[in-house]
Image (cartoon, rainbow, N blue to C red):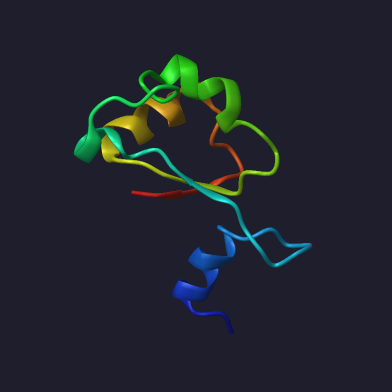
Amino acid sequence: MRTGKQHRLSRLMDVASNRSIIVPIDHGLTMGSLPGIESVRRICHWVGHPSINAIIAHKGMAERLVGTGLLHGKGLVI
């Protein structure tokens, strides 16, 4: 039987390759606004790419991204 941790980690992985592309978009907290990730609208252009398996974001950004529906089927690390 799979443990909870194994189950959660499996949501971050590509089933076919057992690898993942996890994109961090939480830089704004420590580095301020960076070109290309300064708004949800700009992020929406690329975050839905099928090669991206998971996103790392802070709570506020995660709420906005979930609201767009672009994180459906992707892992999320807060």
Left or right: 34 as drawn, with respect to 7: left
Along the line of sight, the residue nearer the viewer: 31 or 44: 31
Residue 72 in the image, given as x and y percentages of width and height: 58, 37
| Residue drawn at 54 percent across, 27 percent down | 69
The residue furthest top is 41
Q: Is residue 45 depicted above or below 1 in this figure?
A: above
Left or right: 51 as drawn, with respect to 24: right
**Image quadrant assignment for residue 24:** top left
Residue 2 in the image, given as x and y percentages of width and height: 56, 80
> Could you tell me which quadrant the N terminus lies in?
bottom right
| Residue drawn at 57 percent across, 45 percent down | 74
| Residue drawn at 34 percent across, 26 percent down | 34
Left or right: 6 as drawn, with respect to 57: right
Q: Is residue 23 depicted above or below 60 in this figure?
A: below
Residue 70 in the image, given as x and y percentages of width and height: 56, 29
Left or right: 42 as drawn, with respect to 17: left
The residue furthest bottom is 1
